Amino acid sequence: MSGSVLEIKDLHVEIEGNEILKGVNLTIKGGEFHAIMGPNGTGKSTLASAIMGHPKYEVTQGSILMDGEDVLEMEVDERAKAGLFLAMQYPSEISGVTTSDFLRSSINAHREEGDEIPLMKFIKEMDAAMDYLEMDKNMAQRYLNEGFSGGEKKRNEILQLMLLQPAIGILDEIDSGLDIDALKVVSKGINKLRSESFGCLIITHYQRLLNYITPDYVHVMMQGRVVKSGGPELVERLESEGYDWIKQELGIEDVTVGK
Amino acid sequence: MAIETKETYGKEYIETFSQQKSEPNWMRKFRLEAFDRSESLAMPKPDKTNITKWNFTNFKHQSEAEESAIESLDQLPSDIKVFVDTEKEDQNFVLLRNQVAVYETLDPTLVEQGVIFTDIFTALEKYPELVQRYYMKEAVAIDEHKMTALHAALVNGGVFVYVPKNVVIDKPLQAIFWQEDQELALFNHVILVAEENSSVTYVENYLSQNNEQETVANIVAEVIAHDNASISFGSVDHFARGTTVYMNRRGVAYRDATIEWALGQMNDGNTVSENVTHLIGDHSVSYAKAVSVGRGDQTQNFTAKIVNHGKHSNGIILQHGVMKDSSSAIFNGIGKIEHGGTKANAEQESRVLMLSKNARGDANPILLIDEDDVTAGHAASVGRVDPVQLYYLMSRGISQKEAERLIIHGFLAPVVNEIPITAVQEQLTQVIEGKVN
C-alpha cells in the first residue's frame, strides 16, 4: 500500500485576530519524515494545531488537502479518520476517563460499528505497545493524563500513535521535557512506524531529537513561513551554527510572529 | 384521579390506616399528632428555589392493586431485575412494590447475630420498642416544617435496618422501592441503626414510570452510627417526571463513627433533596458524595450539609451535577462547624457541568464556622464542556457525541464508582446514559 499525501498550500492562520501563519507551503507523503525546526514563537505549533483543527485557530486563507480531500471542511474526528494524528505538546487531562477506556474508544472510532476490537485483542495490543515504550502498566487504569508527569504524557501520546497507526503523524515538540532515556524510548516508538504507508512531520526546536530520528527533509520556520528547506545535512549546520546565518541570509531581525 | 390531601387523608383516614396496619398505639398517636402539627407548619423554603407551585397535594395514598409475594427474584420484571445481582445467592434484599413488602431475604447467619432488615410495618409489629427508640428522634423531627409533619402522619412504607453491637456485615443490604402504581405516593421511612463497633453497607433504589400521572414522594431516611460504627449508604433515585420529590436523608455519627453517602440523584421530576449529617462525636467522619443529572424542564434543589459538633470531626462534601435542556438546579454545599468542634475539618466541592444554553445550574458554597482552631475549604464551579478537551478526544477519531459522553461520565465517575453494589453501579451508569443522551 502506498501512503497518503498531505498538502498544505499558502496557509494563513489567526489566533484571536493575530495572524500567526503567513503562507505555509508543505507536502508530506507516505514514507517521508519531515522535520520542522525554528526558534520559539515562529508558528511551528500553530501549524500542527491548524492541521488538526484546534478550536482556537482560524484558517483565513489557503488549503489543506489529505489525498485530495479538503481537510478544512472536516470536523476534528473526521480528520483523524482520514488518517491524521497529532501528538500534542499539551495533551488535555480528562478526569474520570481511564486511559485504557479512551484508547479503546479511539481504536473503535476507526472501526465500523459492530466490528469493535475484541477486548482481549485490545489488551494484548495495548500491553505490547506499553512494553515497547517501557511504560508502567498501571497507567492504563489511571485517568487520562491526570497527574501524569511530562514524560508520561509524551509516552502516552506515542502509545496512541502506535495503536492508531495513522497515515500521517504530526509530533508537536514531543521531545520537550524528556530526559535522554525517555527521548530514546519515544524515538524508538516513532521509528518502529517507519514504512511506505506512514508519513511524519516532526516539530522541534532542539536538534537532539533528530539524532535519534533521521528526517528525510528539514524545514526551518520563521515569521510564520517556511524560510528554508533541505535534507538532513541542514540539521547539522543548524546544530553547529544556530539560526543566525539564515536570519542574515534573509535579512530577518525578529524571527517571531504575532507579538 | 387522585384526590386532594385535606379532604381524603385527614385524621379519620389516618386512624383507619394505622389500624389496618395493626400499628402500636404510640405510632397511631404519633401520626395523629404529626397531622395536627402539619396544619399549622409552613412549607420548607429551599434556598433560591420556589416550590410553591409544585404538586404536593395531588396523590393517592394506597394502591388498590393486590400485591402478592414474589417467590424468587427471577420473577421480577426486567427493569427491576437489572438492579439486582440475581446470580449471587444469599442476598440481603427487601423489595417493596407499591409500598407492600413482596420479597424479603436476609442471610440466616445475620439473623442469628440479631441483624434486622425488614419493611417498616413488620418492624413496627415485631420490634415496636426498638423502632420507637429511633423513629424521628435523633435525626429528623416531625415539626421541622410541613413536609416532615405530613411525612410522619402519612408514612406508608419503608425499611428498618438494625445492626447489633460488634456485628460486621460484609455483603451489602439492598432495598428497592418500586412505585408501580402510577399515582401512588411514597411516604417512605428508612431507619438504619448501626450499634457500637458495627459495620454495614446499604443501597436503596427508587423507581417509577409515571411520566404523565402526578404524584408525590415524601421520603425520610434516618441513619444513626453509634460509637465506632461504620455505615456506607448508597442510592439511585429514579422517580419519573410526574413525581414531585421531597427527599430528606439525615445522618448522625457518634464518637469515631463514619457515615459515607454515595447518592445518585436521577429523578426526572421536580425535586428537593437534602442530605445532612451531624458529626456529634469526637473523631467522627462523613463523606457525602452525590451526583445528579437535570433534563427536560425539571427544577431541582440539592443540599449537602455536614455539621461538625465533635472535636477532630471530619466532613467532606463532593457534589457533581450535569444540567441539560432547560432544567435548572441549585447545589447548596454547607459546612458548619459548631462551637467546641476544635480541630474539626470541613471540606466541600461542588461542580456543575452545563450542556445547554437554556439549562441553569448554581453552586452555592457556604461555610459557617463558630470555632477558631479548625480547617475548612471549599471549591465550586459552573462551566461548560471544555472545547479543548473535546478537541483532544476528537483528534483521535472519537465523535463529538461520544467525546461528550466520555467527559460527562468522567465528570460523574468520582461518585458513581463509590456505589457499593456492582449491579446498582452499572444501573446508575445506564440511567445517566439515558438521561444525558
Image (cartoon, coloured by chain):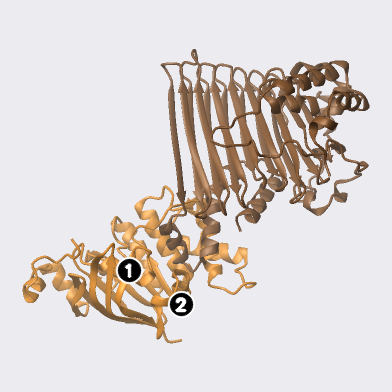
Chain colours: A orange, B brown
- Left or right, B348 with respect to A86, comes to right
Q: Position of residue B265 (x, y in %)?
A: 64, 42
At 55% from the left and 62% from the top, the residue drawn is B402
The amino acid type found where label 1 is placed reads Glu
Q: Which mark is residue A58?
A: 1
Tell me what residue is drawn at x 73 percent, y 41 percent.
Answer: B205
Q: Nearer the viewer, residue A50 or B10?
A: B10
The residue wearing badge 2 is A82
Q: Which residue is depicted at the point 61% across and 69% down?
A: A116
Mark 2: which amino acid?
Answer: Ala
Q: Nearer the viewer, mark 1 or mark 2?
A: 1
- Secondary element type, mark 2: loop
The kind of secondary structure element at disc 1 is strand
Q: Residues within 10 Å of mark 1 (few under 14, many from 20)?
A: some
Q: Quadrant of residue B109?
A: top right
| Viewer-side residue, B42 vs A50 | B42
- Compared with A47, B139 (above or below) is above
Q: Real-space Cα distance between discs 1 and 2?
A: 20 Å
Q: Position of residue A163 (x, y in %)?
A: 48, 68
Determine if marks 1 and 2 fall on one subunit.
yes
Q: Quadrant of the C terminus of chain A?
A: bottom left
Residue located 70% across and 48% down the image: B241
Residue density around tag 2, few if under 14, some if 14–19, many if 20 or more, within 10 Å: many
Q: Quadrant of residue B21?
A: top right
